Amino acid sequence: MIHVANLHKSFRGQQVLKGVNLEFASGKITTIVGTSGCGKTVLLKHLNALYLPDGGAVFVDGVDITKLSQDELYRIRSKFGVLFQGAALLDSLTVFDNVAFPMREKTKTSEADIKTKVSGRLEQVGLGAMGGKFPAELSGGMKKRAGLARALIMDPEIVLFDEPTTGLDPVLATSIHQLIARTQEVFGFTGVVVSHTIPQVFEISDYVAMLANGVIEEVSPPEVFCASPNPAVQQFIHGKTEGPIHVL
Amino acid sequence: MISFLGRTGRLALDQVAGMGRMFSFLMSAIFLAFRPPAKIHLIIYHIKTIGVDSLSVVALSGFFTGMVMGFQGYYSLRKFNAESWLGSVTALGLLRELGPVLSAFMVTGRTGSAMAAELGTMRATEQIDALDSMAINPIKYLVSPRIIASLLAMPLLTAIFDVIGIFGSYLVGVTLLGVSSGSFFAGMENSLVFHDVYSGFIKSLSFGLIITWICCYKGFHAPPMATGVSQATTESVVLSFVMILVWDYFLTSIML
């Protein structure tokens, strides 16, 4: 469904992606891991063309989304839901209005139906009583859950999760992971998770891809990934400073 | 020498490219403003933030500007025994120049800076990316309604500034300094023509566009960090002030 081919990206002369090739299996969760600042979020933002590459292509259902007009791109983006690192809820709207926002803006659904669907999604993420609160009144975990509810409200085919558990305590991180796994089971979307919460994130992943030094070093199911002889993978999993990954 | 020329050329090219991006941003915002669906509720909301919320500061500055003009006008005109022209001088000065320019300055300080800071914060917290990723054009949602609202609100704010300014001048000239009330209004009536009102209206309209354009652009493209937001806010206010004065010069020279 999503295929990244020979992706290159630089920022101010610093090459972040140096020819990334990766295929994301439909209806499965693929987790991208790697050290902080290695370009995971940059890669994720290429998947729905929030960033455009310097070279290479991103295919969604066989269409190269890096070469589309804005209207065509927006049609493709309607297939995506995105959970941003800081949730990116609109400050001026309540939690309910944030979750209802894509429906109100992109569909002609009646307010009664919107209310039913939004309330249902908020219940699913454990925020049933929080609809009237503003984002500033929520904790970090609540914001992530509200962001997840918004990402899922349009029943997307693909959901991108940018570090969904960063900054959360272990208990909350596990509950977010479980929530992602549960919702994926229910809705069957293709999930792409950027994370460095290992090994917990492996529990919800069908595949793990490791980004290091601007390229994908390894893609495999979690159990194979952990046993991989690849020295970069072993260095990352065991948190060693010595090895093929350039740390400092 | 060659490296100096290279740096100068690069700087010039960067400036030209920056101006091109700003112009393209404005064109997108105007084009999207006419593309359905119209964001009526957002336009009304921004008329409140740009117009209603700036009313007190515009009224206050208009009142004191008018009073200062009353004093200064009386002092200057008395030298020629022409105090009776105070109403005419005040009205012409306010309607043609001071009303549009000073109310634009007030709106820049009060609302323009807030626009840049708000959009800059939205950029830093990925709210603009979130809109984009939901296939909602952030320029149509965030910028176009502000531009329409400022085009509607600025002329009204300027008109209020003018009226309150004339009232301030009347208070000083007639009540305090003893100019005849009849001659104050008769001078105004004799010297003011529709073109004076019209030129002030055109100025306020274009200043409204300049403020929203610059402040939204700077906020929208603010570097995603705290210093980026503050830098964007400062740049938006300074550039708006300068552009208002430069554009005022051109309009005055054309419409005089």
Image: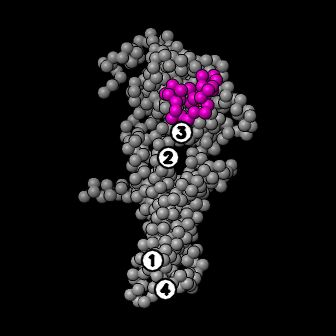
Give the class, few, some or many, for how many residues have Cα within 10 Å of label 1's Cα (few <14, many ≥20).
few
Which numbered mark, 1 or 4, is in the foreground of this view?
Answer: 1
Lateral position of residue B13 relative to residue A96, left or right: left
Which numbered mark, 2 or 4, is in the foreground of this view?
Answer: 4
Lateral position of residue B66 relative to residue A48, left or right: left
Does the magenta run of residues contain A147?
Answer: yes
Choose the circle earlier in sequence order: 1 or 4: 4
Q: Are marks 2 and 4 on the same chain?
A: yes
In the rendered structure, the residue with mark 2 lies on which chain? B
Which numbered mark, 1 or 2, is in the foreground of this view?
Answer: 1
Circles 3 and 1, Cβ within 8 Å, touching? The answer is no
Residue with the mark numbered 3:
A91
Viewer-side residue, A124 vs B80: B80
Task: Please name the amino acid that badge 4 sits on.
Answer: Ser
Image quadrant holding the N terminus of chain A, namely: top right
Please, what secondary structure does the residue beneath circle 2 have? Answer: helix
Residue with the mark numbered 1:
B176
Q: Residue at x 66, y 41 (%)?
A: A105
Q: What number is the disc on residue B84?
A: 4
Magenta segment boundaries in residue numbering: A122-151
Please, what secondary structure does the residue beneath circle 1 have? Answer: helix
Give the class, few, some or many, for how many residues have Cα within 10 Å of label 4's Cα (few <14, many ≥20).
many
Q: Is residue A107 above or below residue B194?
A: above
Please, what secondary structure does the residue beneath circle 4 have? Answer: helix
Task: Please name the amino acid that badge 2 sits on.
Answer: Leu
Residue with the mark numbered 2:
B119
Work out how far the residue at label 2 is from the one at label 4, CA to CA, in angstroms: 50 Å
Residue B205 at x, y = what percent? 56, 65
